[in-house]
Amino acid sequence: MTPRGAWAIPLLAGIAAACGLDAGEPDARFAVAGTGALRDARTGLVWTDRDLGGELDWHAAEALCRELSRAGHDDWRLPEISELEVLHDADEAQPCGRFTCAVDPALALQSPYVWSATPGPPQRRFYADLRFGSKLAPRLRPDLTRRVLCVRGNAPAAPSEP
């Protein structure tokens, strides 16, 4: 005997599918937050939906985010390395240029190497390697180029240690 109302579940799933909604993934990590922008449900940060500007040196990357106007906002910035590290998801494997990145498929990347605003030792800036979830801080030089994801908002504060 079928429980009363059980017929509604497949009906609603069919309606959702017909409307282009994915009823099978109600807890999707990223949601559209305007044209070219995605809100991360885990952090509350809003990211550009793809890397921008091609391969840029760090100074050009920082300027691109600072000057960006997208999805009705002009308060974009280059992310901190800790914010980029949260994007790494070892359970994912998405094409990114000639590599495979461990990021949610909502993000479109052309390379796993993405600049951060985080300074390293003198004259160095960190960038994330989204293949392996690692970070590197090479010496800045004009021919050192990486991809750019811009972000807006503030990440939740890390819990303090006792």
Image (cartoon, helix red, strand yellow):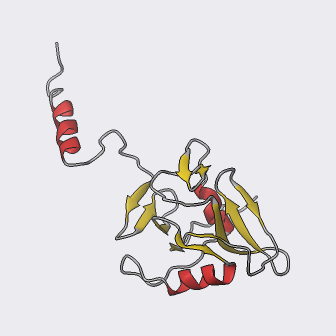
Compare residues 118 and 147 and report the one nearer the observer. Answer: 147
Quadrant assignment for the N terminus: top left
Q: Position of residue 51 (x, y in %)?
A: 53, 67
Residue 120 or residue 12, whichever sits in front:
120
> In the picture provided, is 136 more to the left or to the right than 106?
right
Q: Identify the residue at image location x=70%, y=67%.
A: 127
Name the outermost residue toward the top: 1
Q: Quadrant of residue 97?
A: bottom right
Expressed as whole percent of the image width and height from the top left, the position of residue 39 reads 43, 63
Q: Nearer the viewer, residue 51 or 91?
A: 51
Answer with the quarter of the image where residue 82 lies. bottom right
Give above or below for 28 relative to 57. above
In terms of depth relative to the viewer, which is nearer, 147 or 121? Answer: 147
Residue at 40% in and 47% down: 27
**Residue situated furthest right in the rendering:** 122
Q: Position of residue 53 (x, y in %)?
A: 53, 75
Q: Quadrant of the C terminus?
A: bottom right
Give x and y (percent) for residue 56.
Answer: 63, 76
Drawn side of residue 106 relative to residue 80, left or right: left
Residue at 53 percent across and 60 percent down: it is 109
Q: Quadrant of residue 73?
A: bottom left
**Number of numbered labels in the structure image:** 0
